[in-house]
Image (cartoon, coloured by chain):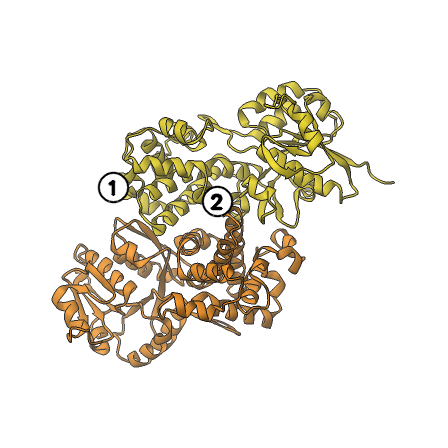
Chain colours: A orange, B yellow
Amino acid sequence: MTPLKSRVTVVGSGNWGSVAAKLIASNTLKLTSFHDEVRMWVYEEKLPTGEKLSETINRTNENVKYLPGIKLGKNVVADPDLQNAVKDANMLVFVTPHQFMEGICKRLVGKLRNDAEAISLTKGMEVKREGPCMISSLISEQLGVNCCVLMGANIANEIAMEKFSEATVGYRKDKDKETADKWVQLFNTSYFAVSAVQDVEGVELCGTLKNVVAIGAGLVDGLDMGNNTKAAIMRIGLREMKAFSKLLFPSVKDSTFFESCGVADLITTCLGGRNRKCAEAFARNGGKRSFDELEAEMLQGQKLQGVSTAKEVYEVLKHRGWLELFPLFSTVHEICIGRLPPAAIVEYSEHTPKFSLVGGSAQFF
Amino acid sequence: MTPLKSRVTVVGSGNWGSVAAKLIASNTLKLTSFHDEVRMWVYEEKLPTGEKLSETINRTNENVKYLPGIKLGKNVVADPDLQNAVKDANMLVFVTPHQFMEGICKRLVGKLRNDAEAISLTKGMEVKREGPCMISSLISEQLGVNCCVLMGANIANEIAMEKFSEATVGYRKDKDKETADKWVQLFNTSYFAVSAVQDVEGVELCGTLKNVVAIGAGLVDGLDMGNNTKAAIMRIGLREMKAFSKLLFPSVKDSTFFESCGVADLITTCLGGRNRKCAEAFARNGGKRSFDELEAEMLQGQKLQGVSTAKEVYEVLKHRGWLELFPLFSTVHEICIGRLPPAAIVEYSEHTPKFSLVGGSAQFF
């Protein structure tokens, strides 16, 4: 008996969502276990030409607004009706900005197939005082589906141009291994190397916490401290990402931080990326112009994830009495709000006398 | 009873040796367990002024040739007589280019104090077919002393200017922990954060293998592939560094690669550094100008460690039948010798079909 073919829907059609649809669509054509068609839910908008975005995508096979110049594959079908887009799919790829996720999930309650599986590509969940609000958990709990995550050093436009990169799929339990392998099959191409690890929280937290480190790296750039110092800050940042994740979720594995979602995404974000860029400008202005101001000027309406995440992480650290254990995370926040000068990023030893001991002594570091 | 004070001699007075003497000299003044004076063996040479290098150092307190503009500390005493320089010291810091190490050790046999301890700061040991020839082992075996290593993201000139950076001390056995802590004390300052790990081979191998990865990163730069791809190559490189080290020395620890000697040194080397730079030029020239040619033109007589290390590593891999397990290391070598084009660095999947499986399946990865 031939098993039923899987049907895939991508929920979201921004820059990264469109690239995800392209990757997937190239694989569903090749793999016999998937229906060729990839449905992509499009938040409908009218283009300056008067045409609707979904219609343009279906006519031109391009997302002219969010990924112009790239053919998505003829088997990608844009659908502006959320419920219609998901109703036949058993594999759902969530890739909308995180602030819309809860609203979208609410609209989908009771509308999915019973055997539906989900994966989240959305980075930047919120870290609340009582702990992080994982997007994979939100999807799981609201929709009653199993939810994996896919994270990594993934600059959408570079992947769209088929430049080599990697990604990590995180899954929760032993029994989800098979599903994770199916997601790997669906995303993996010759220029996009995907591997799976059993550590959904670790993978997802990497995607959020790296932005705090990128602020630190940007400050070092703005202070003209050189590559030595920048590398040190990135390393300390990676260590704090690991320690923070493991304190919140003891199941988080060290090895996850060697994956694309860990060290590679951190590197990409600290080399390019808007958090790094604004932090560099912040330091060059001696902290005299606020992040809000620089963000408005430099990012054309995009928001700076790192500053708000640093604040959220700080709240958790303070609430739990862990501030001293995380000199980098806490210093980044204190610089962002103007309590410390930008140069404090490389003056740990004065502010946190325990700093050099932490590395050697605390078990989880 | 007060324990006897330790006496330190730095064997070597190049760029990094001079910075090491400066770091140490600032600490011996503060720490009561050390004699203030730090002796530094200088390979004597005549300066264009006619004065001897050692005399100039002792007169000006600067190494005008290898670290101009930086005061070493009045308690640094340059000594051109190798045997005289070491005879009273119980702590010996070896920091000469690796090709001179064996000759220096031979001259020191039987000349050291019975209680002498050593540390090596020299990167770039050779990897012979039968395995790496560790410099710490060379020193240990030739001189009958215990030998630690200190490695990390250490660009000497940046440390000389007291810009924040980090380093890792590697020690061999449980019983050496106390000695390692003493080395940490001797090097650690507010801008140079040192920590110790029990993994001498892991720490030392990092310092050599990163240069092979830096060739890969430079090729990516020269191909204008972007940060995504560069981060992926660095991550895969780190993974191969770890796997190679663990196959050769099962005692090597994963955690070592999170230390300054691991991920941070890799980042520094792949951002700046001469291996990266020449590899970028090599790729921009489409591989048509050899590394030898570019090296001669770009490096003013300095040698490109990465190319020869890649060859040495390749020999080991071939000899042991491991080539397929290390697609990055082997591809770098094959590009260096012109067997593959520069673009092969991002075309693993074609050359090594097992590539994407390796990450998930092989135990040591």
Q: Which of A27 and B65 is in front in this view?
A: B65
- Mark 1 or 2, nearer chain start: 2
Q: What residue type is labelled 1?
A: Glu
Residue under label 1: B350
Which quadrant holds residue A23?
bottom left
Crowd band around label 1 with a 10 angstrom C-alpha radius: few (<14), some (14–19), many (20+): few
Query: Which of the image's four quarters has the N terminus of chain A?
Result: bottom left
Label 2 environment density (alpha carbons within 10 Å; few <14, some 14–19, many ≥20): many
Q: Is residue B158 above or below residue A26?
A: above
Spatial CA distance of label 1 from label 2 is 30 Å
Mark 1 or 2: the one toward you:
2
Identify the image quadrant of the C terminus of chain A: bottom right
Marks 1 & 2 on one chain: yes
Location of residue A30 (image quadrant)? bottom left
Residue A209: where, in percent of width, then height?
47, 62
Q: Is mark 2 on a helix, strand or loop?
A: helix
Mark 2 belongs to chain? B
Residue B268: mark: 2
- Residue B317's tag is none
